[in-house]
Amino acid sequence: MEVLGIDIGGTGIKGALVNTLTGELTTDRFRVDTPQPATPQSIAEAIVEMVEHFEWKGKPIGCGFPGVVHHGVAKTAANVDKAWIDLNVESFFHEHTGCPVHVINDADAAGIAETLYGAAKEQSGLTLVLTVGTGIGSAFMYNGRLMPNTELGHLKFKRGIAEHYAADSIRKLKDLSWRTWSRRLNDYLNHVYSLFYPDRIILGGGVSKKFDKIEPYLSVPCPILPASLKNLAGIIGAAVSASETFVTAS
Ligand code: BGC
């Protein structure tokens, strides 16, 4: 099945057509800047631009959203406009695009893709995928099955919340060296490890491309791996999740 996968991020909205049987992109990736403020209306307009770019009419879309998504309804919006909260994002995007739309949390999408086609392929046990970018997202995959909406970036940590201490946006905002910031990330990873004892942690999001700069400072009692699908994981996982939903429904 071919699905338009879309990943809504804090700075960019990225999309591509995905073959959901192989996890491969069948087109180049198309990116538009995330409009600021990132309101439902402005993001819907960017999604329509994406749909028109791919000439995608009435066919399935899978979308990763940077907040808790409970049965299609946004429940949090840490890095986008608060007007998203309690909006049925699936119906809203369907009204704008005319396409059937399935929406899940962006890190959950990355977790699905990395487990099926990426760094945790054919691995059993507990895989924790953390996407480190504007915020920190998390996906727990246990024996290949997702436990959704875990939000480990919002753990209380160092007198605040974890993503305000260790997200990549904090490195940029405070102009921290890779060494200083990687040590922060290492503290956070050890905290998470001591709570859940995952078999492996996969780092995704923007930092997956900078893993060589971070790795020397990481010391955690389980393997830490870069996401092998890099920041395409969100697009691929959202598309795969939509294909499963729409095939089951039909
Ligand atoms: C949100 C998560 C999201 C993560 C990465 C966090 O601020 O609460 O839902 O997965 O950012 O976008």
Image: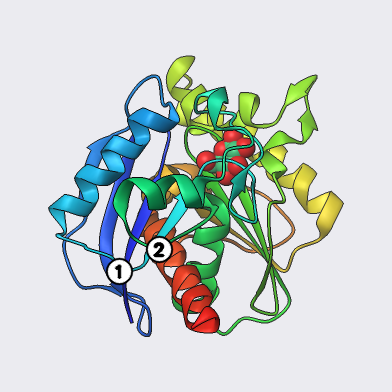
Q: How is the image coloured?
A: rainbow
Marks 2 & 1, CB-CB < 8 Å contact = yes
| Residue drawn at point x = 63 percent, y = 24 percent | 164
Image vertical order of residue 194 relative to residue 238, above or below? above
Q: Position of residue 20 (x, y in %)?
A: 37, 78
| Residue drawn at point x = 48 percent, y = 50 percent | 91
Report the disc number at residue 19: none
The amino acid type of the residue labelled 2 equals Pro
Residues 46 and 198: in front is 46
Mark earlier in primary sequence (2, 1): 1
The amino acid type of the residue labelled 1 equals Lys
- The residue identified by callout 1 is 59
Q: Position of residue 121 (x, y in %)?
A: 52, 79
Q: Position of residue 201 (x, y in %)?
A: 63, 59
Q: Quadrant of residue 122?
A: bottom right
| Residue drawn at point x = 61 percent, y = 46 percent | 73
| Residue drawn at point x = 53 percent, y = 48 percent | 131
Image vertical order of residue 118 relative to residue 155, above or below? below
Residues 198 and 58: in front is 58
Image vertical order of residue 193 relative to residue 124, above or below? above
- The residue identified by callout 2 is 100
Could you tell whether 242 is left or right of 13 in the image?
right
The reply to whether residue 212 is visible in this rendering is: no
Q: Position of residue 244 (x, y in %)?
A: 51, 78
- Picture quarter with ligand 1: top right
